[in-house]
Amino acid sequence: MKHGRTAMLATALVISAMVPVAGRAQAGGPEAVKAGVDAWERGDYSAAVQAWRPLAEAGDADAQFNLAQAYKLGRGVPADLNQAEVYYRRAALQGHQKAEEMYGLALHQRDRFADAVTWLDRAASRGEPRAQFVLGTMYFNGEGVAKDWVRAYALVLRAGDTNLPQAATTLDQMDLYLSVQERQRALKLAATLPGRGPRKARAIGTPAIGLAAAPKPPGKVPATTASAAPPSAQGAWRVQLGAFKDAANARALWGRLSGQVAPFAGRTPSYVASGGVTRLQVGPFAGASEAGAACTAVKATGTPCLPVRP
């Protein structure tokens, strides 16, 4: 994970298996498409595919979309993502809304970001939460679009209004990188975006704690709720939290942990340059046992810690 303004988010989106939909048909009439849907719902996938294939080849968008789903899921035909993409594209080019979304998601999964943007933007503009979520991560990472963290946050926030499970986790990650002012602007933008659910409130004052060693906006250290023993007035021991080639990452880690680890209350960080790296050490502690207890609290956050005596 890169830190600072070069942070990247992973797009952990599971594409659910959607049931094909019946609709209009350019050849054979709507009943021909529906016959395939009925067979699909009975679990007779081969019959469904046989009903849709001639309609899809004749240009029916619903049949093309349904056939794409069959190839994606491997039902009635061997799973074949290439063929699924072919039929999603054919239906999308005819304005089939579900196909537009699925084609955009398929392109994104193949890292064809510039091609995916157009289709995902169309779906997102209709309030499709999965499209909003993926498009939001693309704006955050700068994948196929110029980075825009405010728009990224707004899109993921709107996607989360439908209880999309990945959205909440991703927003917690974004909270570590956006300033309060950026999140406030994103909140206003989210209110103007279409969506499938009612707008939910989200606290934007203090960033959440999530990614290990990720920087937080300067000056926004969350207050610790744990009680801490008064720090030692003097002592020769410190705890070391890591060695960093980039000193900024050492400062970012202290910014994250200083308000999260109770034994750090009243302690000060030291940035020790040595051998081309910067070692982050915190102290003072009266002895090895006190430093060890602090390390126990640090390790509970998932961060390595080692008592040291400089």
Image (spheres, rainbow, N blue to C red):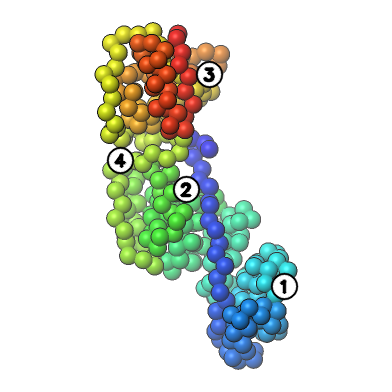
Q: Which residue is mark 1?
A: 77
Q: Quarter of the image holding residue 4?
A: top left
Query: Considering the numbered disc 3 on the image, is that residue within a helix, a strand or a loop?
Result: strand
Numbered mark located on residue 206 in the image? 4
Q: Which circle's residue, 4 or 2, is located before the other in the chain?
A: 2
Circle 4 crowding by C-alpha within 10 Å: few under 14, some 14–19, many from 20 = some
Nearer-the-camera pick, 85 or 160: 160
Residues under labels 2 and 3: Cα distance?
29 Å
> In the image, what residue occupies the spot 40% across and 58% down?
160
Numbered mark located on residue 140 in the image? 2
Q: Which circle's residue, 2 or 3, is located before the other in the chain?
A: 2
> In the image, what residue occupies the spot 49% across and 66% down?
122
Relative height, residue 16 to residue 1 (above, below)? below
Q: Which residue is mark 3?
A: 277
* Amino acid type assigned to the residue bearing label 2 in the image: Phe
Relative height, residue 69 to residue 177 (above, below)? below
Nearer-the-camera pick, 109 or 210: 210
Q: Which circle's residue, 3 or 1, is located before the other in the chain?
A: 1
Between label 4 and label 2, give the one nearer the viewer: 4
Q: Are marks 4 and 2 in contact (CB under 8 Å)?
A: no
Residues under labels 3 and 1: Cα distance?
56 Å
Relative height, residue 266 to residue 16 (above, below)? above
Give how far across and how far down residue 32 sits, in percent.
Answer: 62, 89
Residues under labels 4 and 2: Cα distance?
20 Å
Give how far across and how far down residue 225 sits, in percent.
Answer: 27, 34
Query: Considering the numbered disc 1 on the image, is that residue within a helix, a strand or a loop?
Result: loop
Q: Would residue 13 be seen by someone viewing this image from the given angle?
A: yes
Give how far across and how far down residue 59 sits, in percent.
Answer: 65, 82
Residues under labels 3 and 4: Cα distance?
31 Å
Residues under labels 2 and 1: Cα distance?
37 Å
> In the image, what residue occupies the spot 38% across and 39% down?
209
Between label 2 and label 1, give the one nearer the viewer: 1
